[in-house]
Amino acid sequence: MHLFLPFLPLVLAFPTLTPRSPSPNPNPNPNPNVNPNVNRRAAAPITSQFPYSGAKSNGLPGLGIGNVLVPNPADTAHAFQPPPPGAQRGPCPGMNALANHGFISRDGITTFDELVQAQQNVFNVGYDLAVLLATLGVGLDGDIVTGKLSIGGDATSKTALLGLGLLGKEGGLDTHNTFEADASLTRSDFFLPTSNGDNHSFNSTLFSMMTSTVSTTSSPSAPLYDLKGLSLYRAQRWSQSVAENPNFYFGPKALLLYGAATFLYELYPTNGGLPDKSTISTFFGAVPSPSSPSGYTSQPERIPPNWFSRSTPYTIPDVAIQILEMYTGNPVLFGGNTADGHFDAIFTSDGLINNGSLSADITGTQLACLIYQIVATDETPDSLSNVLKLPIEILNFITGKLNPIFEPLGCPLNTNP
Ligand code: HEM
Ligand SMILES: *[C@@H]1O[C@H](CO)[C@@H](O)[C@H](O)[C@H]1NC(C)=O
Ligand SMILES: *[C@@H]1O[C@H](CO)[C@@H](O)[C@H](O)[C@H]1NC(C)=O
Ligand SMILES: *[C@@H]1O[C@H](CO)[C@@H](O)[C@H](O)[C@H]1NC(C)=O
């Protein structure tokens, strides 16, 4: 089961960065006539009449005001509309819902500042967590020069300044193994031929499986998509991918998938309410349909009517504790399937992931710092994944955004050369 790699793929406690040569100048000949906003409709502005959590369009912290009716029915600019023709939608139901309500651009080409603002205003995501997620989205799948990101597939011509990104293309959130990954709640694995080429849209069979699982841990007649049920379902999806997906890769970055799963019970319930079937179905766009084989069809994701945001900001320390509990409820190994049909666990002699498992006595703060190390050092076990190495410009973008966010937690920080 365990593979002993000849090197230590993850050096988490005291990272030493392998020197990287800077990649070629991203904009050798910047054209002052290129308008970075061309081809993009911005999000509908937040007005003083409907300030929501108090976050402005400048990418800065808002006021963290919660228990707000979102969207206000009088705020017609943020009413639900289905995606306009040609719009991008992708693997993140949260982003899709924000776009369908115009809190980020309805065309699905968004920006760093829009993402930071919308997450705070709609879901009362803490400023720190909003910055972390926006940094990962734009840094890994978008454009660090224009700050733009496609929430669906490749739209490089709209996200990059000269139609060419640092990595040659900007694949959007659909890109595999940058942020999007296998064993998702409701998306098929990337390499599974059964996915018919669609591994980023809602899969109603998986939604049905998730609902069945959480019914066993809460109530068959009134299922709750809570910590206990989602912990079990995440482990089931891991087992399914080990069995069915020869290319399955579940690296330490998969801790982010646990983070996304906590959003079902931390961000989706109306303030004071429960992660019940009606709420979760609306946010995922699941429509009960007895005539469909899975029992569901799908529609665009939306915010339920008369919905109030959570009362307090959901911060990085908050999500770290939930990730820890969800993982330890039904622990699985980090690693990947290999060519000879085995699942090999990631081996590190030191640090917080030991022989493929998260160390038993890890604290919430250590887990938050581990997530920082994983995303800010880009240390990936190459033998198990074909994940590309990030150019130094992107690492600098990531550490530039994340160091001020993680410094207050006492995490050891990286400074790139
Ligand atoms: C800038 C902010 C965000 C970015 C860039 C982002 C991106 C992503 C990506 C790439 C995935 C796919 C992961 C996978 O392969 O399983 C994902 C999953 C998910 N995201 Fe987001 N996300 C953001 C914020 C949010 C917010 C604020 C919410 C909810 C309020 C949310 C809800 C979810 C959920 C529920 C999933 C799991 C979907 C599934 O597995 O079926 N996300 N997100
Ligand atoms: C949805 O997921 C199920 C279960 O893994 C799979 O059998 C099916 O092929 C998937 N459907 C699509 C359209 O990807
Ligand atoms: C998964 O989706 C991507 C992006 O649409 C596509 O390039 C890839 O071929 C798909 N995988 C399979 C097995 O069809
Ligand atoms: C990892 O596994 C090896 C071999 O089984 C063992 O010697 C070592 O003690 C394990 N390390 C931890 C931290 O469990």
Image (cartoon, helix red, strand yellow):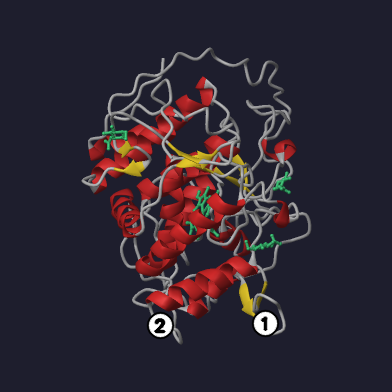
Q: Which residue is mark 1?
A: 289
Mark number, residue 78: none
Label 2 – label 1 distance at C-alpha: 21 Å
Q: Mark 2 or mark 1: which comes first in sequence?
A: 2
Residue 101 x %, y %: 59, 65
125 relative position to 166: left or right: left
Q: Is mark 1 within 8 Å of ligand 2?
A: no
Please give the name of the residue rendered at 36% of the width and 66% of the height, measured from the top-left corner.
Answer: 227
Q: Which residue is mark 2?
A: 219
CA neighbours of label 1 inside 10 A, class few (<14), some (14 to 19), many (20+):
few
Of residues 323 and 220, the one drawn nearer to the viewer in this rendering:
220
Instruction: Point out the residue furthest to the bottom here.
Output: 221
131 relative position to 189: left or right: left
Q: Is residue 218 visible?
A: yes
Image quadrant assignment for residue 123: bottom left
Q: Are marks 2 and 1 in contact (CB under 8 Å)?
A: no
Image quadrant assignment for residue 45: bottom right
Instruction: Identify the secondary structure beneath mark 1.
Output: loop
Please give the name of the residue rendered at 70% of the width and 34% of the height, measured from the top-left corner.
Answer: 35
Residue 77 x %, y %: 61, 66
| Number of numbered callouts drawn | 2
The three-letter amino acid code for the residue at tag 1 is Ser
Instruction: Identify the secondary structure beneath mark 2.
Output: loop
User: Residue 71, relative to residue 391: is it above or below?
Assistant: below
Q: Quadrant of the C terminus?
A: top left
Residue 204 x %, y %: 64, 69
